[in-house]
Image (cartoon, helix red, strand yellow):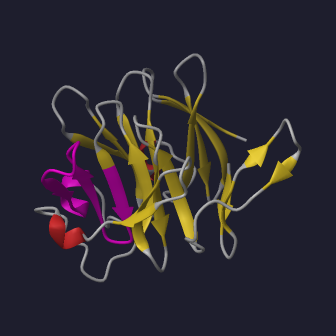
Amino acid sequence: MVGGYPFGLVPLDPERGSCERLGTTRMVSSAARAPDGSLWVAGLTEGLVRLDPASGRETRLDPTSVRGLELGERLPAEVLVSADGALWVGTGDGLFRVEPGLGAATVYSATTLGLRSAEILELFQASDGALWVGTAPGLARQDPASGRFEAVTRRDGLPDDLVCAILEARDGALWLGTNNGLCRFDPRTRAFRTF
């Protein structure tokens, strides 16, 4: 799947070697697949949109319909559907967890994340169930058992506090894209290696 603006979501069909635009959301910043196969799309002008790839049907989520999802003027920049089916929405000023079935939402502020601000740039769920949040002022990890967040910043060894990409290696280490290079971080040993 290729996404971005001004073209929206453009999935690649490797069998035909072609791309065809999916849906009408043009300014896409992030997309995540839900358990039912639908896609949650963070649109920079459209807000949160749920897209059924089979039918092409799009449904805009009215944030006021979900208790606690008080986006206000905040635009969704990142979306993730976690293993438990919850929808995570990252904005330029906060993180929201929407319960499966669009129940109530929980708001996570900069204080909750243990960081100076809550400008969310990346959301990633590791194989151990931990949620990793890349932000402008550092990295935050939510413990799957307690739900508490712990911050990781330059003081801990990150090459830069801005973390805009997160991927997991087979051995459980995280590859982090930062403003000061690519970094390999082992959460178990808390060792960093910058490239």
Count up the numbered dots.
0
Residue 154 image offset from top left, x and y in percent: 47, 51
Name the side, left or right, on which 68 lies relative to 165.
left
Residue at the farthest front position: 55
Question: Which residue ends up furthest to the bottom in the rendered image?
Answer: 73
Residue numbers of the magenta segment: 88-114
Reply above or below: 3 against 139: below
Q: Residue at x 60, y 25 (%)?
A: 169
Q: Quadrant of the C terminus?
A: top right
The one nearer the camera, 154 or 174, is 174
Specify whether residue 103 is painted magenta.
yes
What residue is drawn where x is 85% and y is 35%? 15
Toward the top, the furthest residue is 171
Query: Residue 63 vs residue 137: left or right?
Result: left
Q: Quadrant of residue 183?
A: top right
Residue at 33% from the left image edge and 77% from the top image edge? 74
Q: Looking at the image, which residue is at 47% across and 39% down?
A: 37
Q: Could you tell whether 9 is left or right of 16 in the image?
A: left
Q: Tell me if residue 134 can be seen.
A: no
Residue 68 at x, y percent in the picture: 12, 63
Identify which residue, 50 or 186, lies in the foreground. Answer: 50
Position in image of residue 16 (x %, y %): 87, 41
For residue 117, say whether it is visible: yes
Q: Nearer the viewer, residue 79 or 49?
A: 49
Q: Is residue 46 magenta?
A: no
Up-down relation of residue 164 to residue 117 (above or below): above
Image coordinates of residue 76 in percent, x first then y, are: 40, 68
